[in-house]
Amino acid sequence: MANPYLALVEAHATLLQKTDAPLFANLDGLTPATDTAAADAPVVAIFAPHPDDECIIGALPLRLQREAGHRVVNVAVTQGSNVPRKAERWAELKNACDYLAWGLRETIPGGLEAVTCKTRDGDAAAWAAKVDVIVGILEELKPAVVVCPNDNDGHAAHIGTHFLVMDALKKAKHACLVVQSEFWRAMATPNALIGSNSTDTADLIAALACHVGEVQRNPYHLRLTSWMADNVRRGAEVVGGAGVAAPTFSFGTIYRIDRFDGLQLVASEKKYVLAESDDIRAVFA
């Protein structure tokens, strides 16, 4: 008997090796979303270590925007470490955020440099200056939700961004919901698996395809669905509980959702497994 799964594997491999998947150096051919958030809508601030991270982990912010009327602002903490590419990456990032109808905020011209624990531990003055930049942005945006990487996300700039945001929240005494994301390394104790419908997932991929230089180097836009599908597999057990039935939705993103009380991060005892049809406002419950 022939292996009945061979056709499935070959079909998947074909999708991952697509050579005609469009990239968007500008928004020609795409219809950007319309920002319908009220002027006084709660703000979701994504503190992205690099241009493109905002799209990869953007499922929850996108749902808060589309289903709960929040305004999403992406804060570009850095603009990458490749200096000749910075201007190009900023233009790509603007296209991605314009497509999703997200605001975009620069930290400083060209983005912050050396956002790592090495700087935090070894150059107090330089780190304090970076913290002050983020404090100013927090005071400007007054976000209800802050999204940043977790403290062990497997990349020096991701980990540095986590501590930069936490230090700034403490200095600003800003109370908000804190959503920690993962990408380069799985979190030890996530508490949220957020499902995405096909439209949202496709829009995140299209936004990623605006980061032309990055996905030409590594076509992770084509692999986003694989990662999100695996998140459902893993999140079913690490969030839902060992041995529980897996969710039926196809695509999901794993987070840790806690509250910063103005002084410190207060760990939540709640767990969230939200399908695309569930009320996303449950994350505030």
Image: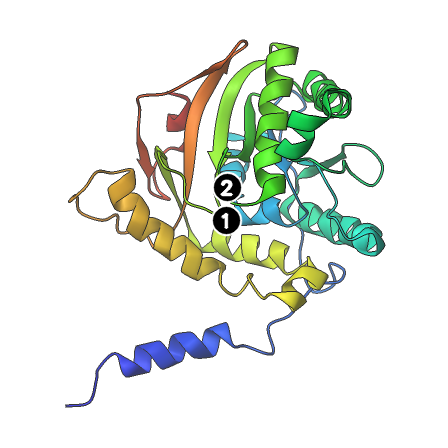
If the image is split into quadrants, where does the C terminus sit? top left
Residue 88: x and y in percent read 81, 55
Say left or right for 52 vs 26: left
- Dots 2, 1 in contact, CB < 8 A: yes
For disc 2, the neighbor class at 10 Å (few under 14, some 14 to 19, many from 20) is many
The residue that label 1 is drawn on is 184
Q: Which residue is drawn at 59% across and 78% down?
A: 19
- For the N terminus, the quadrant is bottom left
Q: Closest to the observer: 243 or 8?
A: 243
Task: Tell me the amino acid under the disc marked 2.
Answer: Asp
Whether residue 42 is visible to the viewer of this picture, yes or no, is no
Residue ranking furthest to the bottom: 1
Give the image location of residue 92, x and y in percent.
74, 54
Give the label on residue 110, or none.
Answer: none
Label located before the other in sequence (2 or 1): 2
Which residue position holds label 2? 153
- Type of amino acid at the residue the image marks with label 1: Trp
Q: Give percent across and percent down for residue 205.
A: 56, 57
Element on which disc 2 rests = loop
Quadrant in the rendering for residue 8 = bottom left
Residue 252 placement, left or right of 86: left
Query: In the rendered image of this protein, does residue 278 appear above or below residue 29?
Result: above
Name the colouring of the figure: rainbow
- Residue 11 to residue 275: above or below: below
Q: Is mark 1 on a helix, strand or loop?
A: loop
Q: Report the number of discs.
A: 2
- Which residue is found at the position 60% from the left and 65% from the top? 218
Q: How far apart are the two marked residues, 2 and 1, measured between alpha carbons?
A: 5 Å
Side of 136 relative to 248 (left or right): right
Residue name at image x 34 percent, y 38 percent: 274
